[in-house]
Image (cartoon, coloured by chain):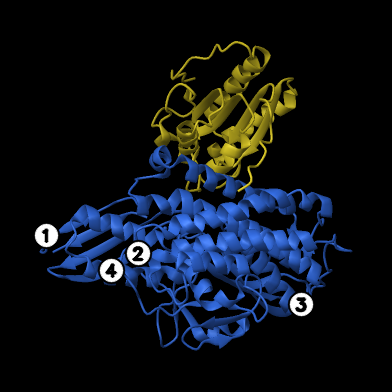
């Protein structure tokens, strides 16, 4: 069997930000919301895209990137708008908190499978923002949107200071 | 070993799409009841299609499923086009078949490698399986990725593609764009051959059933997008006569309708049905893989559906290479469709089986009513029947082992629960 050439010979430069979720399921749209914030600011060094959260496709998406940030709605039981930040390249993330996807293979599973296969980017930061309601419809609850603004600012700083990693690991930052 | 008055409960079945459950009741040495419970909320797609313009039907129905949106888009488009008497040129039909191959590859690869293979090899999930079988898991992920690429290249994006419409496409891809997919697909074809060999080596529980298999069949090709509805028990009808031969009914334990063939009962749709009814139309490379794997129709062991699914990955890769090689950019990406009072029918082979649609349109092209019969709702009764008979034959198994085998049995059908209720947890109750 022929071997397929790798699409990227060297890691892509900058930060890949993936906003996971569905903007038509209220607070599940927090990932896309943060992506839109970043796109509006047109930040150098930051590539931001929205993704529905299918784990298999995520693994293809981050191929070739060394620095990846994901933002996803979370259901951990914390107060709405609470922020958790995980350095997934260093620690397992609580997969049960990130199961909002209607797909069989979720963000957490994608990270763990990639780790097992040695295909996790060098730096993977996952922001979980606690959602309040995931019913059909547009719009975010105010505390969730405020948390999204704060995460957007942190990612902006990360893009500007990509050589440094000033994020707290696994700490709760309720607003 | 326990034989009397046992209660076994499993509240969540993993590795299926959507939310549902399973309940098995055993009294003494008899399985008295099996219920494939689907409790995902009903989604009312048929109702909110009413009053919408026919041109919206593909994009609305695509939202029924994130794994197999092409099936819904194609069946909806075909139904409207048949009602309006619109003929689709062969070049656009070929492009539709090509994107459908992409959906088969991505959906089947996901199920074979990440959802079903762990059952056969004794792992709780693909992550644990990947520790011992990294080469295979990487192969499955790459196959899935190539299927997704094919869908994205033609459809604009892999989930809920945006380039498909009633009458054809908004924009036809350039030949050069598609040719760049040929090398990855040739790799995928080789990988699919290895997939068939790999899954054919799995240990299969000994279980066979005298199923009525139902699929599309076309005289000139392995049916995906067109053909008559046939079965191994004499059914042979145009898709427009589906309602005369099939009935759906509501059952208390499921938000999805249960389907049956009138006067005969449950039937089986999906890769195994297609393989058994259309084996003669597989490509030579796919037939050779079947020969090597010892897979010849009829195959009536539902656990071997994983091998049929792998054969279909291979066929879809091979067919995609053929279609891309022959592809010339069509003169026009779509055929114009004028509104008219009409009733139209569509039926295509979703990865999990036939996906049947019917629409009635008014003079302005508004949808008066719609009916959608997805594959998983059709397979629900046969899943319950399988569980009852299989469970009966394996009552001697310890509860944990029986539970494992029953979950594995359900996953033979790659149920897409969200589609079905347009549903899994397991409860086994022994008394």
Q: Residue furthest right?
A: B331
**Quadrant of the frame with the N terminus of chain B:** bottom left
Q: Which residue is mark 1?
A: B2
Distance, label 4 to label 1, CA atoms, is: 17 Å
Q: Nearer the viewer, residue B54 or B115?
A: B115
For marks 2 and 1, the one nearer the N-term is 1
Q: Colour of chain A?
A: yellow
Which image quarter: residue A67?
top right
- At 11% from the left and 63% from the top, the residue drawn is B3
Q: Colour of chain B?
A: blue
Distance, label 2 to label 4, CA atoms, is: 14 Å
Q: Is residue B395 left or right of residue B209?
A: left
Q: Which residue is mark 3?
A: B84
- Dot 2: within a 10 Å radius of its alpha carbon, few (fewer than 14), some, or many (20 or more) residues? many
**Quadrant of the frame with the C terminus of chain B:** bottom left
Q: Is residue A165 above or below residue B423?
A: above
Q: Which residue is mark 4?
A: B390
Distance, label 2 to label 1, CA atoms, is: 23 Å
Is residue B374 visible in the rendered image? The answer is no
For marks 4 and 1, the one nearer the N-term is 1
For marks 1 and 3, the one nearer the N-term is 1
For marks 2 and 3, the one nearer the N-term is 2
What secondary structure is found at the residue carrying circle 3? helix
Distance, label 2 to label 3, CA atoms, is: 39 Å
For marks 2 and 4, the one nearer the N-term is 2
Is residue A113 visible in the rendered image? The answer is yes
Q: Chain of mark 4?
A: B
Q: Chain of mark 1?
A: B
């Amino acid at each position: 069997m022929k071997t397929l050439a790798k699409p990227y010979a060297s890691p892509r430069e900058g930060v890949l930000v993936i906003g996971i979720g569905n903007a038509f399921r209220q607070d599940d749209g927090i990932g896309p919301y943060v992506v839109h914030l970043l796109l509006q600011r047109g930040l150098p060094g930051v590539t931001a895209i929205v993704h529905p959260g299918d784990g298999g496709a995520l693994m293809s998406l981050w191929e070739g990137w060394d620095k990846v940030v994901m933002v996803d709605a979370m259901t951990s039981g914390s107060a709405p708008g609470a922020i958790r930040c995980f350095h997934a390249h260093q620690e397992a993330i609580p997969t049960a908190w990130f199961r909002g996807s209607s797909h069989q293979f979720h963000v957490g599973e994608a990270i763990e499978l990639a780790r097992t296969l040695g295909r996790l980017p060098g730096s993977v930061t996952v922001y979980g923002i606690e959602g309040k309601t995931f019913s059909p419809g547009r719009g975010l609850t105010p505390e969730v949107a405020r948390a999204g603004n704060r995460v957007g600012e942190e990612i902006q700083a990360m893009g500007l200071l990509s050589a440094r990693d000033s994020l707290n690991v696994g700490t709760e930052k309720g607003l | 070993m326990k034989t009397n008055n046992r209660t076994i409960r499993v509240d969540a079945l993993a590795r299926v799409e959507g939310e549902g459950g399973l309940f098995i009741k055993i009294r003494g040495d008899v399985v008295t009841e099996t219920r494939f419970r689907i409790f995902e909320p009903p989604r009312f797609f048929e109702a909110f299609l009413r009053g919408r313009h026919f041109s919206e039907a593909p994009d609305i129905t695509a939202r029924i499923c994130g794994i197999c949106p092409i099936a819904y888009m194609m069946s909806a488009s075909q139904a409207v086009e048949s009602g309006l008497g619109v003929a689709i040129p062969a070049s656009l039909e070929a492009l539709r078949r090509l994107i459908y191959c992409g959906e088969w590859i991505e959906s089947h690869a996901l199920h074979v490698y990440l959802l079903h293979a762990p059952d056969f090899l004794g792992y709780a999930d693909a992550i644990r399986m990947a520790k011992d079988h990294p080469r295979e898991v990487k192969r499955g992920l790459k196959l899935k990725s190539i299927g997704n690429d094919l869908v994205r290249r033609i459809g604009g994006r892999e989930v809920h593609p945006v380039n498909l419409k009633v009458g054809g496409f908004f924009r036809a891809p350039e030949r050069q764009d598609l040719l760049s997919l040929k090398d990855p697909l040739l790799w995928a074809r080789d990988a699919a051959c290895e997939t068939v060999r790999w899954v054919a080596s799995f240990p299969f529980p000994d279980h066979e059933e005298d199923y009525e298999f139902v699929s599309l069949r076309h005289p000139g090709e392995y049916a995906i997008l067109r053909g008559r509805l046939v079965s191994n028990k004499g059914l042979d009808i145009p898709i427009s006569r589906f309602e005369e031969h099939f009935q759906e009914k509501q059952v208390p334990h499921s938000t999805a309708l249960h389907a049956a063939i009138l006067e005969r009962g449950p039937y089986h749709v999906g890769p195994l049905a297609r393989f058994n009814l259309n084996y003669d139309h597989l490509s030579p490379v796919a037939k050779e893989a079947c020969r090597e794997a010892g897979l010849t129709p009829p195959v009536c062991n539902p656990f071997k559906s994983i091998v049929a699914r792998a054969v279909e990955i291979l066929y879809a890769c091979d067919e995609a290479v053929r279609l891309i090689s022959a592809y010339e950019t069509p003169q026009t990406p779509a055929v114009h469709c004028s509104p008219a009072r009409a009733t139209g029918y569509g039926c295509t082979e979703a990865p999990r089986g036939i996906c049947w649609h019917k629409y009635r349109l008014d003079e302005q092209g508004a949808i008066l009513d719609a009916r959608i019969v997805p594959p998983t709702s059709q397979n629900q009764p046969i899943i319950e029947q399988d569980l009852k008979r299989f469970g009966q034959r394996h009552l001697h198994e310890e509860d944990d082992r029986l539970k494992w085998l029953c979950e594995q049995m359900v996953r033979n059908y790659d149920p897409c629960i969200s589609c079905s209720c347009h549903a899994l947890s397991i409860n086994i109750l022994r008394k």
